Amino acid sequence: MSSPDATVDPELLALRQSIDAVDRELLALLNRRADLALTVGEIKKRQGSVVFRPEREAQVIDGLKAANPGPLVTASVAPIWREIMSACRALETPTRVAFLGPAGTFSEEAALGFFGSSIVRVPCASIDEVMHATTSGAADFGVVPVENSTEGVVARSLDLFLTTPLFIIGETSLIVRQNLLRRIDSAQGVAAVCAHPQALAQCHRWLSHHLPDCERRPVASNAEGARLASLDPTLAAIASVRAGSEYGLHVVAPAIQDDAHNRTRFAIVTHPDRHPAPKASGHDCTGLVVSVTNRPGAVHDMLVPLKNHGVSMSRFESRPARSGQWEYYFYIDVEGHPDEPRVAAALTELRNACAFFKILGTYPIDVH
């Protein structure tokens, strides 16, 4: 019997053999890196240091992007090295990450994109449960959606930032492509569409045009909608392709979101007793929530310290304080780290101008 490569072009065969040799070299180098990571892990244990340092990983990836000579696309560097660092981190200690579940949600996808796949996944039934699991120590980190480019802020996440001790140590965003999923490969006879309320809102126009008579049934997550659709042929779900694969559903209609550039931003949270705030990386964001007394010019006065110290504001959202007094909390993202003198000075003055002031977290951001 001839070998599979008997009829392959000799030049192509030689190239394949060269690639195989490089792959073996890469594997040897990865194992060398893993050995070094284990040694680092032993030192960290003796010093009582944490395993995961988002600012350090951001600096490593930024350095590799800057040094990339090609032809590998620079955008490919980050996901490759996140997986490498994830696998090495798992050798030191397992990282438990809570997210809005079940399996197949965009929150799970965000968790895997940020931490890599070598984690212990802790799916939760609600954003409240994600926060509780992270607060109680059942998970080391939590991943919660905070903002969608179509529907705006995720109110429950913002409200919980006020009442939990958790703080933000990172963020990630996903392009969200919503798909109509069903056990039957047809949209005929659908009685109800199950999805998270945000997903139903993101697909409002499509649903109104193609399924105008169908019930829109809100559920805790898109993946939960996919699970329900897998049990009942009269139901359809709006969810990711991954969720469809997870529950054996057909993609009846792909990319049904009203906004082709629909993105969701996720915050990575942890408890300050188990993880320190990231150190300055050189390109950081600091999140705040504040409130001011209800008087003329109060909001203007609140923003003056940022202007005076040259601190840029990248986000400004308001939420009712639910006090019955028409008072509001303001969620603000500013560029920079509290260790920077100009940022520290601005935050000190801002704190003095506010009736309520809380730093939600500070973390490196991807500027590439």
Image: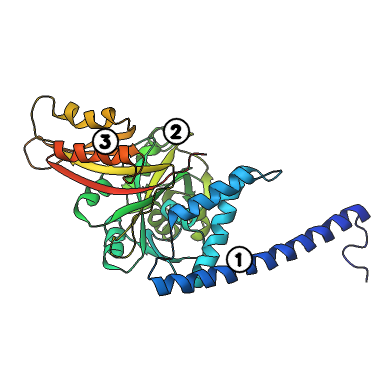
Q: Is residue 41 left or right of residue 337?
A: right
Residue 51 x %, y % = 44, 65
- Mark 1 to mark 3: distance in Å? 43 Å
Q: Is residue 84 left or right of residue 339?
A: right
Q: Quadrant of residue 101?
A: bottom left
Which image quarter holds the N terminus?
Answer: bottom right
In this rendered view, identify the residue nearer to me: 347 or 291.
347
Instruction: Say which of marks 1 and 2 sits in front.
Output: 1
Residue 235 x %, y % = 41, 52
Other-residue count near label 2 (Cα within 10 Å), few / some / many at <14 / 14–19 / ≥20: some
- Mark 2 to mark 3: distance in Å? 21 Å
Instruction: Say which of marks 2 and 3 sits in front.
Output: 3
Mark number displayed over residue 33: 1
Say which amino acid is labelled 3. Answer: Glu
Other-residue count near label 3 (Cα within 10 Å), few / some / many at <14 / 14–19 / ≥20: some
Say which amino acid is labelled 2. Answer: Asp
Mark number displayed over residue 259: 2
Residue 332 x %, y % = 28, 38
In this rendered view, identify the residue nearer to me: 172 or 4.
172
- Mark 1 to mark 2: distance in Å? 42 Å
Looking at the image, residue 213 lies above or below residue 249: above
Earlier in the chain: of badge 2 and badge 3, it is: 2
| Residue ID for mark 3 | 317
In this rendered view, identify the residue nearer to me: 250 or 15.
15
